[in-house]
Amino acid sequence: MSAAAGVGQQWVLVEMVQAFYEAPAYHLILEGILILWIIRLIFSKTYKLQERSDLTPKEKEELIEEWQPEPLVPPVPKDHPALNYNVVSGPPTHKITVNGKECINFASFNFLGLLDNEKVKSAAQASLKKYGVGTCGPRGFYGTFDVHLELEDRLAKFMRTEEAIIYSYGFATIASAIPAYSKRGDIVFVDEAACFAIQKGLQASRSNIKLFKHNDMADLERLLKEQEIEDQKNPRKARVTRRFIVVEGLYMNTGDVCPLPELIKLKYKYKVRIFLEESLSFGVLGEHGRGITEHFGINIDDIDLISANMENSLASIGGFCCGRSFIIDHQRLSGQGYCFSASLPPLLAAAAIEALNIMEDNPDIFQTLRAKCEHMHKALQGISGLKVVGESFSPALHLQLEDSSGSRENDVKLLKRVVDYCMNSGIALTQARYLEKEEKCLPSPSFLPVCRVFSMGALQDLHEAVWCS
Amino acid sequence: MERPGRAALGAQPRANGCGAAHGALRNGFVRGLPGTQINHVVHNGGLYKRPFNEAFEETPMLVAVLTYVGYGVLTLFGYLRDFMRQWKIEKCQNAIEREEQKDFVPLYQDFENFYTRNLYMRIRDSWNRPICSVPGAKVDMMERVSHDYNWTFTYTGKVIKGIINMGSYNYLGFAQNNGTCQQAAAKVLSQYGAGVCSSRQEMGNLDKHEELEKLVARFLGVESAMAYGMGFATNSMNIPALVGKGCLILSDELNHASLVLGARLSGATIRIFKHNNMQSLEKLLKDAIVHGQPRTRRPWKKILILVEGIYSMEGSIVRLPEVIALKKKYKSYLYLDEAHSIGALGPNGRGVVDYFGLNPEDVDVMMGTFTKSFGAAGGYIGGKKELIDYLRTYSHSAVYATSLSPPVVEQIITSMKCIMGEDGTTFGKECVQQLAENTRYFRRRLKEMGFIIYGNEDSPVVPLMLYMPAKIGAFGREMLKRNIGVVVVGFPATPIIESRARFCLSAAHTKEMLDTALKEINEVGDLLQLKYSRHRLVPLLDRPFDETTYEETED
């Protein structure tokens, strides 16, 4: 039993040597091979996966010499339709001077006509005298002015929500709001006709995007049901995957409204949150201009986030999001366009406050706008060769060609001729502009006559001009 | 704005390269001390016409350890408080989800907000301070108090007047509410209104915009330029228009969020090189061209290098001569974001290209913002005519976003003409020189006091290192008590142990204001033990070259 006694004192060298002699041969050979293998691995060359072949420095120099990059930008043909802008001299109000010719403005999104309102201008002047023009900093670093806080307060009260947050650029509003909540792995159901800003927000969020046909609730329900089946296969993942529906109140690309009551039903049935983009419907729909929630009579707390830009009805610059504090407060630290960008110039915030005042004091302005929209919609119905796309109470309509010639380029050229003819007769119109390669679902070419509050008599001229061309 | 008396401009070498003096030795502020880098004329084959003094002193070991300990203690307390909140021992002040939506998937992960709830909330009063006057050299702030440890704020209604503003980006002092700029903007406002209500390609292109773009092109020395409504959006909307899949973007480690977002949205491959490190950039360029795209080995379509003029968190200036040399050697394109450096660097205020004396045509895409030095809002891109024509047609902003507001455009036009000297006065040039002198003076004095200051000697952005989390809040509050408004930054804008206070100098700061600020900083530095630097600069015994402007006074 010397081995058993030896176990207790294994550290003694003599015992170790004894064990060495007593071990079986195969054991020693195996250990010897393993030790040799370890030594080989330690001293062998490591392989990098990238360089499969070792190039000599001379070959590398040759490769660097030979490589030719593409030019930074491809050349743009001189007659590209988007290259030559119309130059507007003077203010873009009701009567507008385009390229030297005086026209009636049917192209700016100045729905309530507040662009040249004297009260708005004097409020902006007062703010300019007090604060200067720029804010010289983002909201976190001495860029928060009392006008910003006042505007956020007023917007929240107007929309009857808990809190509102302001951005300094309309496009950046929804494009920063979506990635703040929806991250990689989350699911977003979005309408096909969503505007470009929403598409960019979705791209920045890196979430799974599921498109449903425009305003087709059956299609959306089908997608939601499919997702539910997926969830049952993997309940743990489903418990942490957030879901959102992103829709617009009044669609920019088609001029119609989303069926909000059905969406609310789907929201509670499938437990999805709703983000509503109200750039065109804020200040247009609803009895007091509160947008599509007032239009349909829906409780505003049912919508998780409402985002709008102030560049249409409020005739200012910038955008805002409103909703419950639980949701909006998060954007103050994670909305990229809010944290990393300078705040809105105070004179524009003051102009927006004054515009809100006007909206609150004259609620009949919205009836007038709606009446004009209906009138315009009816008047444009009978024109041969063109069909009107959009709801009757939408201030921005699309006029598309009834029979397309098959090629988008030819359609665009034909429409351009129509627009030019109208321009020469004194009506300023514009074609709807898109980035052809970037849009997910490109709408057909059209032009957009925009209805404004003070445009009664001009409608007759518009009708005639378009008829003749 | 009164200026200190100055001697004739003459042939005396001045700060910021104004007035030639080729290779003249600076005052010897940094006389070969360890831990700093000096590139004199002899280095880099004569690419640099003047010394490039940039220093990032290493964090002292004891300070780093104590900072980690500090964060550890805060984290423990954070867990304790969360535990107490969960078990209703402590009242939960967070906003909570609606009752009807309690069974929805939670909108925020609990852990995501751990930092916000437990660390950020405690010192939240250092940020988002509301002001109610023009953001010039002195500013009025609305007083706000919190009775529940920063969860909610109430405004007392009192206004604290005359706070020295070291936080706003007002480099040339154009944030004014009187004077020629403001009057011109007022006139345009009454004529054009505040908004535009249309995008550039539709009906929003005013004659004012065309005038602005021609002026910007002349200012930068490029063929053509285009202006946009928001600086952040300029980057995030135009980089995707320039590069796409199959292209390579080489971006600096510390680039701004807008550049990172634009690069990600473009769909190109992104590779990061170490901050301002030319060897790292060269290695990446070589590897990219020799090995091509990963896996398919196809050659890259184009390579775009993204750098900034001044990095706002570090205060460092890009090594532009070397970047341009590399760009030419490897046939890539350079995108320079001059958000902070336009107007603030260079003898004529034309930015970092002017500062190094280089040719603006070497930079393919010159981007910048109007928010910082021009006191307005918006961004621009300048370059060759083909580039700008392409952007006019394909930029996302031109098609879908509203154009600049007319009074803002007028402010930019007036201030730019002032800087160029075209309004008939030398006011602009004086502002540029005043800023350069303020920068040199302020940085030198802080280094003499013993603080660790990062960045280049000529950059008007001055980061002062704090390191420990508790000192972030303490520094902000103590300075406010002494009527000085500073900006403090911590994680996640900076690495976790390198929190700092950042001063933005302005041409509107007079020497008295700077001296007051320096005195208070000295006091607070002693109080909070912030003087970490081991390379204390020796106060100069020989008289400085600009002695005629600034006397060395006793504090």
Image (spheres, coloured by chain):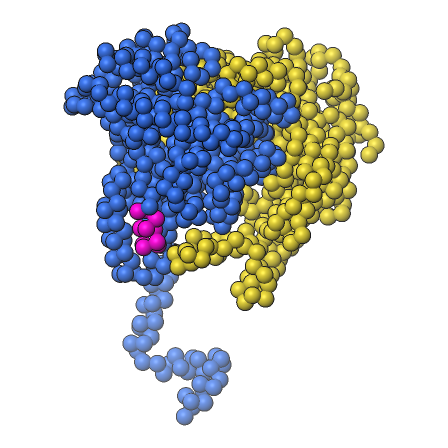
Which lettered chain is shown in blue?
A
Q: Nearer the viewer, residue A465 or B224?
A: A465
Residue farthest bottom in this picture: A1
Specify the quadrant that holds the N terminus of chain A: bottom left
Residue plotted at (22% across, 18% down): A383
Residue B449 x %, y %: 74, 39
Residue B266 x %, y %: 36, 34
- In screen coordinates, is B345 left or right of A306? right
Q: In which quarter of the image is residue B30?
A: top right
**Magenta segment main secondary structure:** helix
Residue plotted at (34% across, 25% down): A373
Report if residue B270 is visible in the image.
Answer: no
Determine the colour of chain B: yellow
Residue B401, above or below A410: below
Specify the quadrant that holds the C terminus of chain A: top left
Tell me where the magenta segment starts and ends, as one range. A262-271
Residue plotted at (64% across, 44% down): B126
